[in-house]
Amino acid sequence: MAEGGAEKSKRVVVVGGGIGGGFIAKILQSSQNEVTLIDPKEYLEIPWAQLRSMVEPSFAERTLIKHSEYLTGVTIVSSHATNVTNHEVQTADGRTFPYDYLVVATGHPGSNKVNRKDRLSHFQQDYEKIKSSNSILIIGGGPTGVELAGEIAVDFPEKKVTLVHKGSRLMEFIGPKASRKTFNWLVKKKVEVILGQTVDLESLSESGVYVTSGGEKISADCHFVCVGKPVASSWLHDSILKQSLDNKGQLMVDANLRVKGRDNIFAVGDITDVPEIKQGFLAEGHASVAAKNLQLLIKGAPEKKLATYKASPPIALVSLGRKEGVAQFPFATLSGCLPGKIKSKDLFVGKTRKALGLKSA
Ligand SMILES: Cc1cc2nc3c(=O)[nH]c(=O)nc-3n(C[C@H](O)[C@H](O)[C@H](O)COP(=O)(O)OP(=O)(O)OC[C@H]3O[C@@H](n4cnc5c(N)ncnc54)[C@H](O)[C@@H]3O)c2cc1C
């Protein structure tokens, strides 16, 4: 018999229903344990598909997946977690959820549309906005701004798209070669890219003339703000985990993906300080290692049996419209149709749905 009360079911609380949280809840639902998922939204959103959904709203039908669709053996709680103590998680609606094991997976805040239906309507509104505008300003040249510019430039080549980015190159999270190839692709598609400047977000109007920090005037019928959102860890600021946050707001984890110094608290996905590019497929990898370790601990396995997670080399794929893309691998950086073939057509949506046990189409 295993040590530590192996037969007794344990209470596992997962906070955050994005890629990392959704996947770990999915893995753990087939265990003997009582699993609870806390997420303000009633659905999991595949974040990297949102730019396609802005130019083709029906695409979102497959990318917004109700938690109840893929989690059949999990208690789903629709609320924000607001605090965690040594024994329980507190939520914004005043409830408390005791845990034996906790998984923190609050990578980014996510949409404020908590109902799937409202999120679908939001994409429809974005689409109408793009369709009815002749000129569009995109603020932010990270992956979101770049992928949105790519989608608009390909689907609406007649529109004037301007992208303003405060950095000296696009997408600083990947190498300069990939940034350069992306810049050249956008320019070829007639996107005007302005680097090293900002647009004051405080004084934005819905349309008209936008003035950059360098004094340039940009006329646009509408704008989209695509600046990176901070990690969603503010709810931990007054909690038992406040000392476990680094200066970027990330949770410091050990090689087994437990929050440093904590025996029964794991963290997965973008909220962790694992030194690698923040990617959904890596969050899925975290989920499988953390789920394995959590189950080993529940069975009473010794620490030395726990699986370790090794940070991934810098791999990234950025889509540029429906057929092309830029890929950074450890050995090469490619652009054009080959990376486009890997990501841009379906944006890994079918693959992600299948991994969640759903039909890909
Ligand atoms: C434009 C773009 C393109 C990308 N392309 C790719 C790609 O091609 N391939 C790839 O692998 N990755 C890609 N990524 C990265 C990928 O989206 C993230 O790495 C991944 O979503 C991280 O998963 P996560 O679970 O850590 O966080 P998220 O998916 O951000 O989920 C966090 C969840 O936590 C919830 N939450 C937040 N605060 C609270 C709270 N207080 N209480 C309860 N719940 C809370 C949110 O509602 C959300 O559901 C891309 C990202 C972007 C923006």
Image (tube, rainbow, N blue to C red):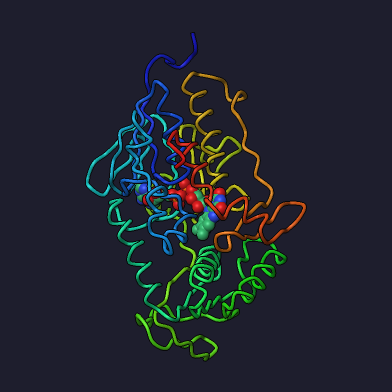
**Vertical relation: 146 (above or below) 251:** below
Give the residue at x 51% y 64%: 144
Residue most extreme to the left: 94
**Vertical relation: 6 (above or below) 222:** above
Nearer to the camera, 127 or 299 = 127
In the image, is 327 to the left or to the right of 53? right
Q: Identify the image quadrant of the C terminus.
A: top left
Give the residue at x 51% y 37%: 287
Residue most extreme to the right: 331
In the image, is 172 to the left or to the right of 54? right
In the image, is 305 to the left or to the right of 202? right
Task: Give how far across and how far down residue 55 sits, in percent.
Answer: 43, 64
Give the residue at x 28% y 53%: 117
Q: Is residue 245 visible?
A: no
Task: Give how far across and how far down residue 93 sits, in percent.
Answer: 22, 47
Nearer to the camera, 114 or 105 = 114
**Vertical relation: 313 (above or below) 87:** below
Q: Is residue 22 visible?
A: yes
Task: Give how far across and how far down residue 112 sits, in percent.
Answer: 32, 58
Task: Give how far across and how far down residue 6 sits, in percent.
Answer: 44, 15
Give the residue at x 76% y 55%: 332
State how many labels appear: 0
**Vertical relation: 246 (above or below) 30:** below
